[in-house]
Image: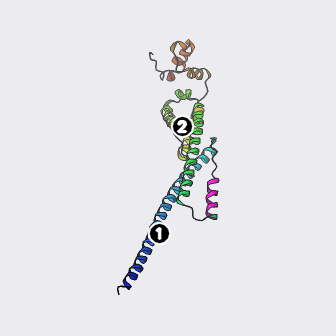
Amino acid sequence: MSDAQPDGLLVRAKRLTNLARQARKGAEAIQDHTRTETALSKLDASLSELESAVKLESKLVSSGVASASEVDLTKAPKDLQSHIASVGRPSPQLLTARANDAAKAVRAISDAATEAWTTWSQGRLNALPVDRLARLGFERRTVELRLESLKRMAGAPPTTDSVGTFLEAYEAVASRLEKVTPEGPLDALLAKLPCHLDELTDDELRLLRVDHPDIGAQIVLRVE
């Protein structure tokens, strides 16, 4: 019995060692699975953001806004597809790297879109004949509120929704201002404002007081 006991202990020790090794492998597999799931979630989130950025760029281009973005969106997916075909399941590190690539592409596209949008939308606003506002009568305040909203949208990073809203509001404002009947002398006078009183001629003052008192009533004088 005493000779068999060491053998029994040795067998038990080997069994415990195998069990411990299996436990370690199981824990490592669980950790690897967890890391892979985390990396996949990050990649999925980055791809969703990339999809939104590409949709925004498409919206801008279709609206006449030229974007300077030159991001290659084909290389990273092809590299990942090639890795899966030749090696197998990608590691968490590789998935994280692809997620970071997607995030960089999002930043590049978004920055280019914002720059293009700001330049384009401000240019459109500058082209509006806002000197005609004084001749809108009771509609003036409504148009002015729309103009304020347009300026806020032009100064903020664009979204697909804000671009659509801007285009609709801009068309409404531009259409209303274009319907104002042209009046050469009055238009020229309004285009001079704001200005100093001594910059107005007697004919221009008479134009405001006599011919267009409704416009003259909207002009406020102040001392600088």
Q: Name which residue lies at 49% across and 62% down.
A: 37
Q: Name which residue lies at 55% across and 36% down.
A: 173
Q: Percent position (x, y) of residue 9? A: 38, 79
Query: Marks 1 and 2, how far apart in space?
Result: 57 Å
Q: Which corner quadrant holds the C terminus?
A: top left
Horizontal side of residue 86 vs 47, given as left or right:
right
169 or 51: nearer the viewer? 51
Who comes first in sequence, dot 1 or dot 2?
Answer: 1
Q: Percent position (x, y) of residue 177? A: 57, 32
53 or 22: nearer the viewer? 22
Q: Percent position (x, y) of residue 216? A: 50, 20
Q: Amino acid at mark 2?
A: Ala
Q: Which residue is mark 1?
A: 25
What residue occupies the far left of the structure in this picture? 2
142 or 55: nearer the viewer? 55
**What mark, if any, has residue 154 been given in the picture?**
2
What range is drawn magenta here?
72-85
Q: Percent position (x, y) of residue 176? A: 57, 35
Secondary element under disc 2, as helix, strand or loop, is helix
Specify few, some or many for label 1: CA neighbours under 10 Å numbering under 14, 14-19, or 20 or more: few
Q: Amino acid at mark 1?
A: Lys
Verify whether residue 81 appears in magenta: yes
Verify whether residue 84 appears in magenta: yes
Res 17 → quadrant: bottom left
